[in-house]
Image (cartoon, coloured by chain):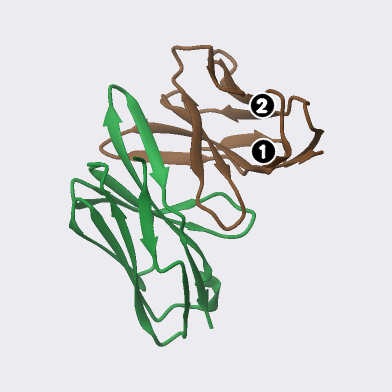
Amino acid sequence: DTEVTQTPKHLVMGMTNKKSLKCEQHMGHRAMYWYKQKAKKPPELMFVYSYEKLSINESVPSRFSPECPNSSLLNLHLHALQPEDSALYLCASSQELAGWYEQYFGPGTRLTVT
Amino acid sequence: QQQVKQSPQSLIVQKGGIPIINCAYENTAFDYFPWYQQFPGKGPALLIAIRPDVSEKKEGRFTISFNKSAKQFSLHIMDSQPGDSATYFCAASMFAGAQKLVFGQGTRLTINP
């Protein structure tokens, strides 16, 4: 099973709201990722957690706050977002095995900021 | 040097034809090259991947050709079907504590019936 699940599928929020995106995987992967994808563009890396510790932050604004409560869960807390933050937010997980790093993506959360 | 250049941007092929999508990279530290397929409103799905010690890899109708000296790799889709119509992304990565994928800009492929 190579499934990464994300909730909610769609989210509409105002610029003063606080909301959270949730991601879950049960493949035993020890690395988890958040990406942002705008229309007709490739996914853009935001954060990487490795063994539940934040290992990469791609200079993401502080209105995005990641959290990794355990090895299967990844959250993205959202606060005071801007309309330009509207995008598809993708979670992914991966495991390095003998030089292969298969990274699997979830279906994404479509976020609209009004 | 971290870029992956992908071409063409869009491609239209008749059913049964062989679309070819090309990618080029500069960083010789990259050691893993996956291709992803993405349908509208869905997350990217891992299609096939290759490491630089192999020149070709086939999985079903999908083939990656890899030219290490030219720092180029390509995806071929044999006997293409309308259901293959999607956006395809090539990527390159290396592992340094965590995997960081560098994506190409994507190719929007349309297979006409």
Which residue is at the front of the view, A50 or B29?
A50
The chain that hosts pointer 1 is B
Task: Give the labeled residue for mark 1.
Answer: B84
Left or right side of A9 for B60: right
Chain shown in green: A
In the displayed structure, B94 sits above or below B44; it is: above
Name the kind of residue labelled 1 in the image. Answer: Asp
Q: Residue at x 47, y 85 (%)?
A: A14
Q: CA distance from mark 1 to mark 2?
A: 9 Å
Q: Position of residue A47 (x, y in %)?
A: 34, 54
In the displayed structure, A106 sits above or below A16; it is: above
Task: Give the labeled residue for mark 2.
Answer: B77
Q: Quadrant of the C terminus of chain B?
A: top right
> Which element is circle 2 on?
strand
Q: Residue at x 28, y 36 (%)?
A: A95
The chain that hosts pointer 2 is B
Q: Residue at x 27, y 42 (%)?
A: A27
Q: Position of residue B17 (x, y in %)?
A: 78, 26
Which image quadrant is residue B85 in? top right
Left or right side of B51 for A19: left
In the displayed structure, A57 sits above or below A78; it is: above
Reading the chain from its start, which is encountered first: label 1 or label 2?
Answer: 2
Is the residue under label 2 in contact with that under label 1 (CB below 8 Å)?
yes
